[in-house]
Image: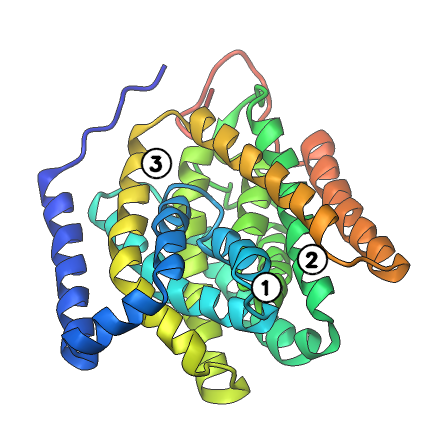
Amino acid sequence: MSRRRRIPANSLLFSLGTALLVWVLVLSVAGISRFLQVLAEHWPVALTMVFGSFIAGATSEGGGAVAFPVFTKLLGVAAQDAKIFSLAIQSVGMTAASLTIIAMRIQVEWRVVRWVSAGGLLGIVVGAALLAPLMSSVMLKMTFTMLVTSFAFTLYLLNRRLPLRRQAVPSQAVGSAGVLFAAGLVGGMVSGLVGNGIDIVAFSVMVLLFRVNEKIATPTSVVLMAINAVAGFALHYFVVGGFNAQVAAFWLASIPVVVIGAPFGAIVCAMLNRQTIARVLIGLIVVEFVSSVLILPLDMSAAITSIAIFFGFLSVYLLMYKYSPYAPAVTGKTSANESY
């Protein structure tokens, strides 16, 4: 059993200092009266991100995994606006969580960050600029639902004992760079469609294919989503468009929340048992799936496409889990690069 990690006092001070700096900037630019007016009008959005930002920092699911379904199903926000808000708010919250991860010296697989981010930058352009305009609002919502539902299977597999887990993707593994780039490309396209996804795809590839310890894969996925969210937000703000007044108001109301919630989630992730968080996530995903089936108006075409997306991701996850060529060999001894 691993020892519970102690939180360095200087890391807490760093996180609090970062949050305070963001608060001062927000209140200085927007003005206190304007901020309070926006918060009073959009408090459900801020409340959603209290939980969403914690999930973003503590798990491999970004804040968009909470924001997108709540916004589109409960708050009646258009899927396109929910997607852009997800990218905008994660560009703040996930960046704050990433800085906390670095300050706490939590291990991150930087080689994965480099290759997946390279694919992700291309993927998010393809997803946001080319694919998103071709998809209906219902299909955008169902794409997200099928992505996270198949991801629940990854979490289930992690709660079963994988043979050995590495501390890093082996640098000598044949084709690993191409696999990571491809994972980033797919994850980036999904992020371009629904505002979240590169973290889920990268996490799944790391733990199922390369057998990287999830305690390392999780903070790595947080850093990846931060980079992808910043790129996606910039793409929509400067090129594609869509960052309208409503999304901007949602963003303003939520920034002070996420700069506290996401770093706090990263700290909790370093402290708590992963199985507890995984079970909570699986429960949320079940609710997401059931609500999508019951609420969304699915025609035959949308239903068939949704099933195809689900089984597409699920098949890839199963193949990685069962037939990974990168799985550590069980020799009776555990090397420094492998752990139970």
Amino acid type at circle 3 is Cys
- Residue highlighted by disc 2: 143
Q: In this view, does 218 lie to the left or right of 120?
A: left
Residue shown at the point (79%, 45%) measured from the top left: 311
Query: Where is mark 1, residue-wise?
Result: 194
**Secondary structure under badge 1?**
helix
Nearest the eye: 85 or 319: 85
Query: Measured from the top left, where is residue 36 in percent x and y?
Result: 22, 69
Whether residue 85 is visible, yes or no, is yes
* Residue at position x 28%, y 57% in the image: 257
Give the crowd class for mark 2: few <14, some 14-19, many >=20 residues within 10 Å. many
Foreground residue among 1 and 166: 1
Helix, strand or loop at disc 3?
Answer: helix
207, above or below 241, in the image: above
- Contact between marks 2 and 1 (CB within 8 A): the answer is yes
Q: Mark 3 points at which residue?
A: 269
Where disc 2 sits, the SS reads: helix
Q: In this view, does 151 lie above or below 4?
A: below
| Mark sitting earlier along the chain (2/1) | 2
Viewer-proximal residue, 10 or 40?
40
**Where residue 15 is drawn, which disc sits there?**
none
